Amino acid sequence: MPSSITPDKAIALLRGAGVRPDVMRASLTLGSVMGFFADYLGHSEKRDYWIAAGLLHFVSRQGPLTRKQFIEAGADEEFLSIVAEGEIELDEVTPRPGKKRVPREEIPQLTRAEKLRTLLVTLDHLITFVQAVAETRPQKSVDGMKVSAVQKKFKDRRFMPSVSRAKILDGARKLRIEIGDFTSKTMRAICDSEEKVSNIMKDVG
């Protein structure tokens, strides 16, 4: 049966799970950014599906929701395999010491489901990193922040060591998006989502 899960159903699951405010805000932001990239990557017809995946990514990792709850909300098997089956790992395409770099033209084209999976992992780390950089600014906001500021912190391994630079770089390469452009688009999507996220957070209370 095709998935009938929607952003509204996903938000209802989040509310029912009683997640912390910081997890709720992070989930709402990831959902919005996933919607942006659904349009950018040519999957506008699945935009709500991608948003729902972003909304539920964090809680699926933390485990407060059961498989039955996902199914009752309309999740199909693909959604469950991507979002609700625990931590997602990606094959690496960025070279490690002693390994040869995989040429861009040899990186396999991703299916729609693989793009969704790759984005979830990559944006999980990149959004966390971008927002951490924003917190170092007087404005505490991504608005007006330059990509170069993120890139500078990216090179500093002492800053946010919990964020996987490798997963961000691998994800961007697998999606065939230059890392600076990928970061810029992510920052734009975060800014575009801020007002909507704040309004939902007020409603959640």
Image (cartoon, rainbow, N blue to C red):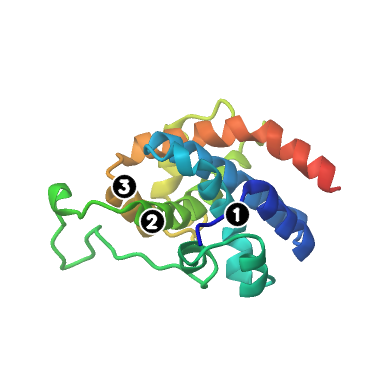
The residue identified by callout 2 is 113
N-terminal of the pair, mark 3 or mark 2, is: 2
Pinpoint residue 42: horizontal percent, then vertical percent.
37, 37
Q: Which mark is residue 175?
A: 3
N-terminal of the pair, mark 3 or mark 1, is: 1
Tell me, yes or no, whether the two marked residues, 2 and 1, touch with CB atoms within 8 Å. no
Q: Nearer the viewer, mark 3 or mark 1?
A: 1
Q: Which mark is residue 5?
A: 1
Q: Nearer the viewer, mark 3 or mark 2?
A: 2
Tell me, yes or no, whether the two marked residues, 3 and 1, touch with CB atoms within 8 Å. no
Residue at mark 3 to residue at mark 1: CA–CA distance: 25 Å
Q: Which mark is residue 80?
A: none
Q: Residue at x 86, y 48 (%)?
A: 205
Q: Secondary structure at mark 1?
A: loop
Q: Residue at x 17, y 48 (%)?
A: 104
Instruction: Identify residue type, mark 2.
Output: Ala
Residue at mark 2 to residue at mark 1: CA–CA distance: 15 Å
In the drawing, does residue 59 fall left or right of residue 130?
A: right
Pinpoint residue 17: horizontal percent, then vertical percent.
75, 65
Badge 2, how many Cα within 10 Å: few under 14, some, many 20+? some
Residue placed most toward the observer, 87 or 85 = 85
In the drawing, does residue 102 fall left or right of residue 70?
A: left
Q: Residue at x 53, y 49 (%)?
A: 49
Instruction: Identify residue type, mark 3.
Output: Leu
Instruction: Identify residue type, mark 1.
Output: Ile
Badge 1, how many Cα within 10 Å: few under 14, some, many 20+? many
- Residue 36 visible somewhere in the drawing: yes
Q: Secondary structure at mark 2?
A: helix
